[in-house]
Amino acid sequence: MARNKLNKGSSGQNRKASDNYLEKFRQKPDVIETDTGLLYRVVEEGDGLSPTMDDKVVVNQRIQLVNGKVIADTYQDGMPDTFSMKEAIPGIQEGLQLAKQGGRYEFVVPPDLAWGKKGVGNKIGPNAVLIFDVRLMDVVFE
């Protein structure tokens, strides 16, 4: 049990690393910050429709922690993810509604728009920032 806690990092250590990462990312050119604290940049502009909370999306995505550890990578797996917008964490719900089909985006999701103080499982510790490299491949209207 103690070993898992070491792997995930303490809540305080994660908060410090998360805050540092967010501050550095904010300084990059063309980074936009929303009112909720979501940080993003457009890697490649899309020209299709944007999803709403009632839609499903098909995305390729790479999800990383601030230490560079990759949690999931559909680009590498070759199998895009399909999910309902309502199933996504709040930061991705917000980000994808700003995205256009066909586009590629980098979303930096602060802990309060992701898994917060609890984290999830043994992959995402408490107060973790998540970095998403997302290509919105399709919007499926429900």
Image: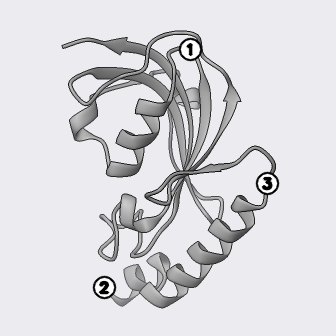
Task: Return the disc, 3 or 1, that comes first in the chain's sequence.
Answer: 3
Q: Nearer the viewer, residue 118 or 139?
A: 139
Q: Are marks 1 and 2 in contact (CB under 8 Å)?
A: no
Kindly indicate the quadrant of the structure image that contains residue 22. bottom right
Q: Is residue 63 above or below residue 47?
A: below
Q: Residues within 10 Å of mark 3 (few under 14, many from 20)?
A: few
Where is residue 87? Give x, y as percent. Answer: 23, 39
Tell me which amino acid carries mark 3: Lys
Q: Secondary structure at mark 3?
A: loop
Amino acid found under the numbered disc labelled 2: Met
- Kindly report the distance in space between the C-alpha atoms of the residues bearing marks 3 and 1: 23 Å
Residue under pointer 1: 102
Residue 71 vs 27, above or below: the answer is above
Mark seen at residue 1: 2
Please tell me which residue is depicted at 46% across the width and 40% down the height of the picture: 95
Nearer to me, 28 or 89: 28
Residue pointed to by mark 3: 28
Q: CA distance from mark 2 to mark 3?
A: 38 Å
The residue under label 1 is which amino acid type? Gly
* Mark with earlier residue (1, 2): 2
Front of the two marks 3 and 1 = 3
Q: Residue furthest right?
A: 29
Mark 1 vs mark 2, CA separation in Å: 43 Å
Where does residue 96 sit, x and y in percent of width and height? 43, 33
Give the mark nearer the N terminus: 2 vs 3.
Answer: 2
